[in-house]
Amino acid sequence: MAYDLIVVGAGVLGTFHAYHAAKAGLRVLLLEKDRYPVGATVRNFGQVVPSGLAGRWFEHGRRSLEIYGDIQQETDLTIRQNGTVYVASDEAEWTLANELHDRYATVGYASKLLSKAQCLAKYPSLQPDYVRGAIFFPQEVSVEPDMMIHRLIAYCQQKLGVDYRSVSTVIGVDEIGTQGVRVTLSNAQQFAADRLLVCSGHEVRLLFPEVLAQADLVVSKLQMLKVAPVTGLDLPGNILTGLTIRRYEAFEECPSFASLATPEPLAELKKWGIHILFKQAIDGSIIVGDSHEYAAATEQEDLGFHTQDYINNLMLTEAQRIVQFPLVVQQAWAGFYSQTKAEIFEHIITENIRVTTGIGGKGMTSSAGYAEESIGQWYR
Ligand SMILES: Cc1cc2nc3c(=O)[nH]c(=O)nc-3n(C[C@H](O)[C@H](O)[C@H](O)COP(=O)(O)OP(=O)(O)OC[C@H]3O[C@@H](n4cnc5c(N)ncnc54)[C@H](O)[C@@H]3O)c2cc1C
């Protein structure tokens, strides 16, 4: 079969490129090296939170909400619209929440400030001593990260005719004159198309290693926990807390951010890039995280494959300061993503070959909208 576009990598970034290309009528081949995706796209919280992003990424996130909603109408992608809350724990964070509320009012993005009493009434499992107030975004959604991508891929296959092949590691790319591109898999199979897009996540050694080595990509390792369901506990939506207010780009743009000081008890948490987020899964278990350690993408092995108890204990201690229910750890894992100071790495190898990776910690939120623009511009 002749293809118009081959996409390498079936994480959320590659799959949404395949989705938009197929919707535009292109014949698409999506190639994934693993038996099913096991990268950043399945190891995350599944929080779709444009409210935390700045600039064009906020707009891509906003558009992504619409795209997720559209697909959810046709197939169950596990989208749940329970909103996002950022719980402020002190005056400085509460001031930032108020400033963000004002800013979003000017761009017509709905948010609501919750007093301490309102916040505790809506989220009764929070520790009253922790809560100063909160900002709530009713339109934001969450997905089940271990299910969403598989369902999106199935939808792309069944409804849009995308040819998806797993256990298909691309190890070579050749241009066929000016006619197009041929890829070679590790099993020597070959496929050709007019164009090729590589969305290989934090994998930087298989394709265009010399380009990716020069791309200033940094890999972040994040530690995550899943805690046991608690009978009767209802913790809807995306729950983000004070350290997130101190970390996310959207708050950085607020006037008082420049004078924000780190209280001494938070210094050790900040050192490990810890902020505390909660996301209750459909089965009642709760994902709690996360921490951030960094290494150059070419030296990512130095981050190790283990999780450190010390970091998990820091996260659990801070999480227990925020919620009243017991945190009984069922699973711990590490996730990895690549990022760049330029917000994303977009590289044109030739007219017909592009590499796009390094979307960082915003991929579940903004890939759907970003990929729509990216395909639109390439095929304009
Ligand atoms: C712990 C954690 C929590 C996060 N929480 C959130 C969140 O709540 N909200 C949010 O918006 N974002 C979140 N993120 C970020 C988000 O998960 C990432 O931005 C996103 O998943 C990146 O998608 P990707 O497709 O670029 O990479 P990946 O998901 O890593 O996918 C890349 C794919 O390419 C494949 N591949 C690589 N090379 C080849 C090759 N040569 N041939 C074939 N296949 C290949 C890989 O096997 C992989 O499946 C989180 C990330 C982590 C790690």
Image (cartoon, grey):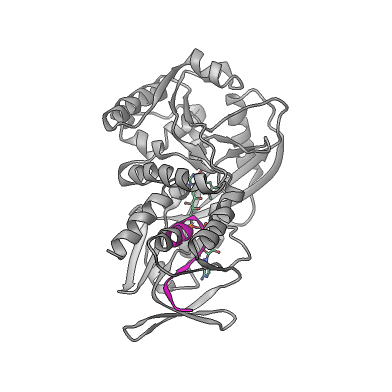
Establish if 20 lies above or below 122.
below
- Decide whether residue 5 is among the magenta residues: yes
Q: Residue at the bottom extreme?
A: 177
On screen, residue 175 versus residue 289, left or right, reads left
Q: Which residue lies at the image location 36% right of the left edge and 47% below the top edge?
A: 60
Establish if 20 lies above or below 290.
below
**Residue 219, can we see it?**
no
Establish if 297 lies above or below 208.
above
- In which image quadrant can residue 32 be found? bottom right
Q: Which residue lies at the image location 58% right of the left edge and 36% below the top edge?
A: 279
Q: Camera-side residue: 293 or 13? A: 13
Q: Which residue lies at the image location 34% right of the left edge and 32% below the top edge?
A: 109
On screen, residue 284 versus residue 46, left or right, reads right
- In which image quadrant can residue 134 be found? top left
Could you tell me which quadrant the C terminus lies in?
bottom left
Q: Residue at the top extreme?
A: 117
The segment highlighted magenta reads 1-18
Q: Camera-side residue: 266 or 150? A: 150
Q: Which residue lies at the image location 41% right of the left edge and 25% below the top edge?
A: 93
At which x and y percent is residue 378?
31, 64
At which x and y percent is residue 176?
38, 85
